[in-house]
Amino acid sequence: MKQYYHTLIIGTGCAGYSAAERLFDLGVRDIAIVTEGRLMGTSRNTGSDKQTYYKLSLSGGDGDSVRELAETLYAGGGVMGEHALCEAAYSTRCFMHLVELGVPFPTNEYGEYAGYKTDHDPRARATSCGPLTSRYMTEALERSVQSKGIEIVDGQRVIKILTDDAGVTGVACISPKTGAILTLSCSHIVLATGGPACVYQSTVYPESQHGATGLAIEAGATLSNLEEWQYGMASTKFRWNLSGTYQQVLPRYISVDETGTEREFLHDALGNESLGFIFLKGYQWPFDVKKLPGSSQIDLLVAAECRKGRRVYLDFTRNPEGLEGGFDALPAEAHAYLDRSGALFGTPVERLEKMNAGAVALYAAHGIDLHREYLEIAVSAQHCNGGVAVDENWQSDVAGLYVVGEAAGTFGVYRPGGSALNSTQVGALRAAEHIAENPRKTNPISAYTPPKLRFGSSNIPEIRAALQAEMTRVAGFDRSTDGMRALLARMNTLYHDFFDTVSGENVSNAVEIFKLYDMVLTGRAILSAMLCSAESIGSHGAALVDGRPPQSGEARRTRTLTRGDASYIDAVSPMPNPELWFETLLARQQRK
């Protein structure tokens, strides 16, 4: 292992691996990937019924264009115009690169990559390899990285991005096994650590995912839109999104109280209208205040049952109330969909086997038999649409620090399902191109002196669990401004006295102390953004603030910026109108 690298990439998911192999192909060979654990993280360990990749349409006769895709991304609100245009313009290039690497996206016999509609998608741009799309992407990109001989520094948790007045100079890492500190110098850093999975109790992020947004916060980077999240129904025993086919087959929603009494609470509250809402949950999985009344009532009703101390389940073994007389009780859209899928028969699990057998097999592989047992669920945090503010090259306002994937704040209020996977590849390529074309000189890093850690009786699990539970209670999709203010004050107190308050059992707990510190740094910034947004905008997107309905149906043309725990509202940039005259672009290219 060397002491100095041109570029260090932090993270071994879709975004991190992509940045590394793109840099290598652009001639930047003095690079290494640093990771706490190569097999950890969201990209390798999460999915849904058919995990979606969103791209430009590449089949059929319906029209599409780069600008139209960009407008779809921009229309979600809170999105910078340059990010929308880049993610649209690079879409096909990045998708076909994955195809060439062996990611098995389905085609017809003539090579068309057929699509389907996903949430917030005006066209059928979505595609999928099944439940494990992001894993297949990660594995294909990893094979490419390994074939190029790119160094992977495994078993090192980055605990600080080192900087001077001119920008990044390196990183400090800690070994989870020994607690030993390692410092590495570099001129560029690509932060690809995923979203802040650590902050909520009810979450569908895999247990191996923590996030490291606090690294950027402590380095002085500005954050964007940290209040914008996606929440939706997920299983809790095995963390997995329950979108798409899991809802379209119409499972029963039941709650069980402390006496063991079961109740089909959706039908009690909504009558036969619940059937249509359950079906629509497949398309409309994320909670959305615009769908109140509508399918998002399901989320509120599930959360209400949980607050009463009841356990909530999906039951795929029996049909829900309302279907006693047959499928004619269904709304026309649901009836037509199941009919065309050949699934107007049987029980929910039998329909699921017919329409998406892999969705049943997935749970069986994790010891859950949907033919026989209920599936416990909760409304869970799934994706942070905010993150580190970056420019059109995915560089933060800390020189030399680039942020790609979910860690970057590029997604806005609404995003089409699967656009996050496209963004991992586009952001990685844009960052790699900019790094390759813009060398920067740095001074060798000075010695890093870590804070003094306390050991003895560990209070980490207790503090972490209490903060996560309170975040879920007051700062999830159903937010309380009073509750968030109280929690922010609590986190601020902990932050200022952190290393005098938190203790681990022994040196092997050192990495857990730094993870909790990252969680507190990130939680403060998220709560600040949420409170700023609540006061300025109120309920919108996935945030129902103090039970109030949204004030405006207009697409958001602002974003919330945060530094430390201070936030303010700023305008988003318009869609660029760049040069498209071919002769001009050809002449520009020939001058390079």
Image: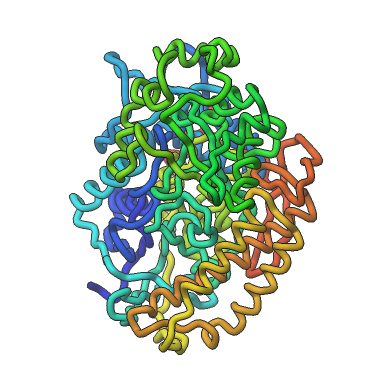
Residue 440 versus residue 473: which sits nearer the camera?
473
What is the total number of numbered labels drawn onto the structure image? 0
Q: Colour scheme of this structure image?
A: rainbow
Q: Quadrant of residue 153?
A: bottom left
Query: Residue 139 in the image: x percent, y percent?
Result: 26, 46
Horizontally, is 339 left or right of 254 in the view? left
Could you say where residue 518 lies in the image, as x and y percent from the top left? 50, 70
Which residue is at a point 34% across and 42% down the rendered structure image? 368
At 44% from the left and 13% from the top, the residue drawn is 344
Residue beneath the point at 35% across and 32% down = 371
- Give the image location of residue 489, x and y in percent: 69, 73
Q: Of 129 and 56, which appears nearest the observer?
A: 129
| Quarter residue 160 falls in | bottom left
User: Is residue 200 depicted above or below 215 in this figure?
Assistant: above
Q: Residue at x 46, y 11 (%)?
A: 339
Residue 580 visible at all: no
Instruction: Decide if residue 396 is on the left or right side of residue 435.
Output: right
Relative height, residue 382 to residue 84 (above, below): below
Q: Is residue 205 visible?
A: yes
* Position of the C terminus by quadrant: top left
- For this rendering, which residue is in front, 147 or 512? 512
Residue 474: percent from left, percent from top: 67, 58
Give the side of residue 578 with respect to residue 113, left or right.
right
Q: Quadrant of the N terminus?
A: bottom left
Q: Give the vertical position of 300 relative to 490 (above or below).
A: above
